Amino acid sequence: MQALSTSMTTDGRPQNRALSLGRIAGAIALVVFGWLAVVVALTFGSAPGKSMAIVGPQSHALATIAKANGRILASNDYVTIARSDDADFVARLYAAGALLVLDAEQAGGCSGLPPASSLRAKQSNPSFG
């Protein structure tokens, strides 16, 4: 019986490696989904007038923005940038069916537009930049 027990111990090593890789993958998934949850939650606290990136198919995003009474700033196949001066714009976007809403300025300026502070400096001083 002990010989059988010993062979089972050596046969178990590949299972330990697979288990270890599974734990690493699970930890990575947990970190990514946790980060995404924090980013999405922070968009609800965004100040009115900020640019929001609506992620999803263009036609769906445009319809969602129209239902939420927003202004479209830029659009491509899967990211549409919109703005509204209303404080509950993000909540209205989700209520209208938005798949994912992120703060466009915090997401790395995915609109392709210069940062707002740089744009304001250029408008107030034409010789800037």
Image (cartoon, helix red, strand yellow):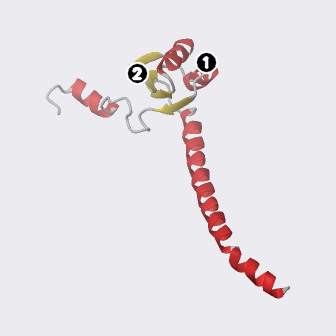
Q: Residue furthest bottom?
A: 2
- Nearer to us in this view, 115 or 101: 101
Label 2 sits on residue: 75
Give the Cα distance between marks 1 and 2: 18 Å
- Nearer to us in this view, 4 or 9: 4
Q: Residue furthest left?
A: 127
Q: Quadrant of residue 43?
A: top right
* Local secondary structure at mark 1: loop
Label 1 sits on residue: 96
- In percent of width and height, residue 8 lies at 75, 77
Under mark 2, the amino acid is: Ser
- In percent of width and height, residue 21 lies at 60, 62
For the point 41% across and 34% down, the residue is: 105
Circle 1 crowding by C-alpha within 10 Å: few under 14, some 14–19, many from 20: some
Circle 2 crowding by C-alpha within 10 Å: few under 14, some 14–19, many from 20: some
Q: Is residue 12 left or right of residue 76?
A: right
Taking 85 as reference, is 107 above or below it? below
Number of dots carrying numbers: 2
Under mark 1, the amino acid is: Ala
Q: Quadrant of the N terminus?
A: bottom right
Name which of mark 1 and mark 2 comes first in the sequence.
Answer: 2
- In percent of width and height, residue 41 lies at 59, 38
Taking 103 as reference, is 24 above or below it? below
For the point 39% across and 33% down, the residue is: 110
Taking 23 as reference, is 4 above or below it? below
Q: Quadrant of the C terminus?
A: top left
- In percent of width and height, residue 39 lies at 54, 40
User: Which tag is nearer the camera, tag 1 or tag 2?
Assistant: 2
- Nearer to us in this view, 127 or 111: 111
Q: Is residue 113 left or right of residue 15?
A: left
- Nearer to us in this view, 19 or 13: 13
